[in-house]
Amino acid sequence: MSAAPGNFHEVQSPEHFQALLSEDLNRVSLINFWAPWAEPCKQMNEVVLELAKKYPQILVLQVEAETQSDISESFEVEAVPTFVILRGHTLLGRISGADAPALTEAIAIHVRGPSSINPQSHTDRAPAAAPASAPAESPEELNERLRKLMNQDKVVLFMKGSPDQPRCGFSRRIVDLLRSQGVEFSTFDILSDESVRQGLKVLNNWPTFPQLIINGEFVGGLDVVKEMVDNGELKELLA
Amino acid sequence: MPISAVDLENAIRAAMPVTHLEIEDTSNGCGENYSVFVVSQAFEGKNTLARHRFINEVLKNEIAQMHAFSQKTLTPAQWEAQIAKQTS
């Protein structure tokens, strides 16, 4: 038997089987249930190997039906060879017996993807809109929202994460710094809202977070605020 | 290609008078994280944010290629005062 390509695996256990399948739930897989004592399997194994080489995008799992009885039972395999074709965990097709042309054709069809299959119905209606987390915002509306956020308190910190669970070293340090200076501030987690995150970078002409806002105006990031603590500017601003 | 401390120094010196300059590679020699300390007359009259924005603009291309960048800025007068305080 010639060398096996990377997408071809001899399954060692149900866990191994599951792990390989779960790697990519959009991937088509071909499972070959075989037995060493069944003569037709020898030929079909060669066919399967050729299919693995021809279609590197599919996963090919060789399952020795009797040693891997748990897997065979879960697929209700009663005879070998049996071929099961899946996309992720979804059953696409099943072929019993050493039918090389049928197997080859089935793989070719499923690999082409669902779009090549003739649909049973057509519709011109657009798919239902995804539940909107926020309605589409115009730039003006976004800026309006950003200004409101920046003015929600005298001191507002736009950071990654929350003060008690910062998601970045710089955000954590600025929180520690403000607390050590006895500054009261509210926060906004920019990881929770991508439009705020990108909008503030543009509005404040500052490429990174954290961003500290005092009296509705952008003051700076960690470095700037650190310096302002050292040179007294921060105290002046908060007076 | 990683940025070198020399690249940063050249860019800074080309853009402003430099009284004192320290550049530290904080990525252990990988050229990915830098910390700079710049003392320059150019900072006179600029508040902290304005100074930082100035440096960000001067080093825009270099910073874009780094993972992390931090800076500290002083005017010559502030630096003298800092040294005096430290040595007193």
Image (cartoon, helix red, strand yellow):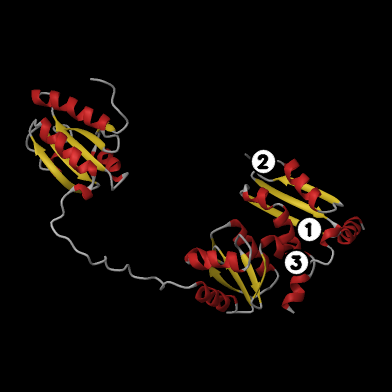
Q: CA distance from mark 3 to mark 2?
A: 28 Å
* Labels 1 and 3 touching (C-beta < 8 A): no
Q: Is residue A40 above or below residue B68?
A: above
In what quadrant of the picture does the C terminus of chain A appear?
Answer: bottom right
In what quadrant of the picture does the N terminus of chain A appear?
Answer: top left
Q: What residue is shown with label 2?
A: B28
> What is the x, y in percent for residue A77?
10, 39
Q: CA distance from mark 1 to mark 3?
A: 11 Å
The residue furthest front is A124
Q: Are marks 1 and 3 on the same chain?
A: no
> What is the x, y in percent for residue A32?
17, 34
Q: Quadrant of residue B75?
A: bottom right
Callout 3 secondary element: helix
Q: Amino acid type of disc 3? A: Met
Q: What residue is shown with label 3?
A: A228
Callout 1 secondary element: strand
